[in-house]
Image: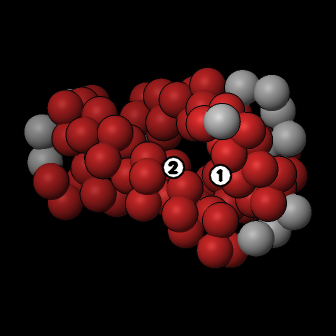
Amino acid sequence: MQESKQSDTTTRIANGDVHAFAHFFRQQWPQVYGTALHLTRDPEQAADLAQDVFAKLWQEVGVYFTAPHFLLYLCEIHHRLSLSLPRSSL
């Protein structure tokens, strides 16, 4: 049932449903922010990085949310954005 609900949510997001994306955002924020905080050790920079991850997802919603393993794309975006941080920030 959980997988079916997740599939429904990702389909709605892929179709541009802002409310479904907001739900996804609230659900995934703690993990994305926590990883960003671990990488940056700065709460403000971590929040900015996490926000950038979700902004990138929304900008390319049709690409990421139609992929079979969109959570892997979430991790990939997060990783790529963290690599773009200045080394002095890490």
Q: Which residue is mark 2?
A: 53
Above or below residue 14? Residue 79 is: above
Quarter assignment of residue 44: bottom left
Residue 59: x percent and y percent? 72, 61
User: Considering depth in this image, is 19 or 32 the residue closer to the camera?
Assistant: 19
Q: Judging from the image, what secondary structure is the residue with disc 2 in?
A: helix
Q: Which residue is mark 1?
A: 57
Above or below residue 82? Residue 24 is: below
Q: Amino acid at mark 1?
A: Leu
**Circles 2, 1 touching at the beta carbon (< 8 Å):** yes
Please give the name of the residue rendered at 62% of the width and 63% of the height, measured from the top-left corner. Answer: 21
Please give the name of the residue rendered at 65% of the width and 65% of the height, measured from the top-left corner. Answer: 20
Please give the name of the residue rendered at 25% of the width and 40% of the height, measured from the top-left corner. Answer: 34
Label for residue 48? none
Q: Is residue 7 left or right of residue 22?
A: right
Q: CA distance from mark 2 to mark 1?
A: 6 Å
User: Considering depth in this image, is 85 or 78 the residue closer to the camera?
Assistant: 78
Q: Is residue 19 left or right of residue 13?
A: left
Q: Is residue 4 left or right of residue 23?
A: right
